[in-house]
């Protein structure tokens, strides 16, 4: 079974631009979570989607948004990019919502903002 | 609120010697704990998980971890390090938040170096 895939793998943007990242979960997984990884802040939770509904959101500004489609694929969008948004963005999928959830991670998208 | 503290930011061992990566957690109820590994330029891979069954948990690649409630610890060990074990390791607690939300809370990570 194919793992979690994320596209693109690398991205370079300029301050003020917006960006959209894509995540395809493992087949059959309906929950998708997004995380931001930076050297200074480590891994931080962005949001979680299940059946096209955002269930939980981390402490990030409104410039960060996401959505999930009926086929469980998810996108996250960052508008008005800032230098501090440079990070590795990781997507994870899980089969169920039953706690504790076991999440499977994709390789990430490396975003560089110049 | 739950939290995780990884006691060492860097650990260096020689190939063939034991590995010990230390993790303490804080939880108001019985936690669920994980160890993930991240190789350079890769995503995170689940090594093992504890979910209130056996306190000694065996994972992939010869790793294991022991849950000690009295010490609030979940240390990761491996009897003999291999060069391919060089990576960053994250101790993670699964938080069951209000409304039944699942959220992973990550430790700061421990970078493991393995020398020949």
Image: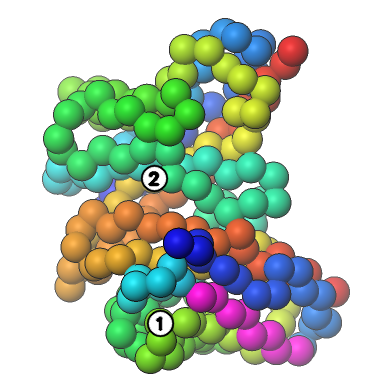
Task: Say left or right for B76 vs A16.
Answer: left
Q: Which mark is residue B7?
A: none
Task: Say left or right for A35 vs A17.
Answer: left
Q: What residue is disc 1 on?
A: A72
Please tell me which residue is depicted at 38% across the width and 32% down the height of the picture: B59
Give x and y (percent) for residue A47: 42, 74
Quarter-wise, where is residue A38 in the image? bottom right
Q: Dot 2 lies on which element?
A: strand
Of marks 1 and 2, the one in the foreground: 1
Name the subunit of mark 1.
Answer: A
Q: Main secondary structure of the magenta part?
A: strand
Quarter-wise, where is residue B46 in the image? top left
Q: Is residue A64 visible?
A: no
Please tell me which residue is depicted at 58% across the width and 80% down the height of the picture: A22
Quarter of the image for the C terminus of chain A: give it: bottom right
Name the subunit of mark 2.
Answer: B
Please tell me which residue is depicted at 56% across the width and 33% down the height of the picture: B110
On screen, residue B42 above or below B82: below
Q: Dot 1 lies on which element?
A: loop
Q: Is residue A98 visible?
A: yes
| Dot 1 alpha-carbon crowd within 10 angstroms: few under 14, some 14 to 19, many 20 or more | many
On screen, residue B56 above or below A51: above
Task: Say left or right for A6 vs B57.
Answer: right
Please tell me which residue is depicted at 43% across the width and 57% down the height of the picture: A104
How many marks are shown on the rendered structure?
A: 2
Q: Which mark is residue B92?
A: 2
Residue A13, magenta (yes or no)? no
For the magenta stretch, what is the residue range?
A: A17-24
On screen, residue B22 above or below A9: above
Give x and y (percent) for residue A16: 76, 88
Give x and y (percent) for residue A59: 45, 71
């Amino acid at each position: 079974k194919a793992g979690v895939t994320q596209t693109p793998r690398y991205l370079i943007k300029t301050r003020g631009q917006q960006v959209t990242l894509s995540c395809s979960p493992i087949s059959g997984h309906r929950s998708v979570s997004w995380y931001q990884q930076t050297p200074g802040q480590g891994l931080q939770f962005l949001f979680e989607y299940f059946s096209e509904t955002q269930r939980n959101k981390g402490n990030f500004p409104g410039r960060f948004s996401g959505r999930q489609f009926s086929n469980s694929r998810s996108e996250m969008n960052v508008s008005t990019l800032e230098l501090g948004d440079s990070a590795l963005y990781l997507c994870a999928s899980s089969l169920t919502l039953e706690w504790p959830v076991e999440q499977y991670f994709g390789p990430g998208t490396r975003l560089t903002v110049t | 609120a739950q939290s995780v503290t990884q006691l060492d930011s860097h650990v260096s061992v020689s190939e063939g010697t034991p590995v010990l990566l230390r993790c303490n957690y804080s939880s108001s109820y019985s936690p669920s704990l994980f160890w993930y590994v991240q190789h350079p330029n890769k995503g995170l891979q689940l090594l093992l998980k504890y979910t209130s069954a056996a306190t000694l948990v065996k994972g992939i690649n010869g790793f294991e971890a022991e849950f000690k409630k009295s010490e609030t610890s979940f240390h990761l060990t491996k009897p003999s390090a291999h060069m391919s074990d060089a990576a960053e390791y994250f101790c993670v607690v699964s938080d069951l938040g209000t409304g039944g939300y699942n959220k992973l809370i990550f430790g700061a990570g421990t970078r493991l170096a393995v020398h020949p």
